[in-house]
Image (spheres, rainbow, N blue to C red):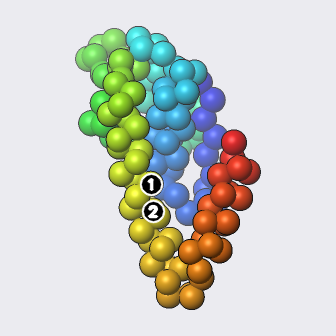
Amino acid sequence: MDILISNSSGVPLYEQIEEQIKSQIITGELCEGDALPSMRILAKELKISIITTKRAYEDLERDGFIESVTGKGSFVKGINSDIVKEKMMFAIQELLETAVDKAVMGKVTLDELQEMLKLLYEEKK
């Protein structure tokens, strides 16, 4: 499992870990039943506090992506892709609302906004 973190990104480290693990589960890089590194080992590998990895794992478990078994570790949980997509759509909608607010404030037209979104989307594909 590859996780890269950046201290200069402005995104909290635990969120960076969560997002990368979620992405690996959604894309199938991590499959149902796969063991995740222990919180202690991941913290050591990333050279961060175990509290940070604990927070990431707790949030992943709360969101239904992993399950933790006392004494055995944390494992990828089987996920319902429809539920995952719905959660992603909700998060995207919140981000787009912020973008639209800024666009309206900056007098950016709908066409300009759509073009920006199209370019950004194609860049990531």
Q: Residue at x 46, y 21 (%)?
A: 36
- 42, above or below 94, in the image: above
Relative horizontal placement of residue 92, taking residue 10 as reference (left or right) = left
- Locate the N terminus and report the quarter of the image it occupies: top right
Give percent across and percent down for residue 57.
37, 34
Give percent across and percent down for residue 94.
39, 61
Q: Residue at x 35, y 41 (%)?
A: 86
Report the residue marked by disc 1: 92
- 102, above or below 14, in the image: below
The label shown at residue 56 is none
Badge 2 marks a residue whose secondary structure is: helix
Q: Residues within 10 Å of mark 1 (few under 14, many from 20)?
A: few
Relative horizontal placement of residue 48, taking residue 65 as reference (left or right) = right
Q: Give amino acid for label 2.
A: Leu
- Locate the C terminus and report the quarter of the image it occupies: top right
Closer-to-camera residue (13/92):
92
Q: Residue at x 60, y 35 (%)?
A: 3
Residue 113 visible in rendering: yes
Q: Are marks 1 and 2 in contact (CB under 8 Å)?
A: yes
Closer-to-camera residue (83/109):
109
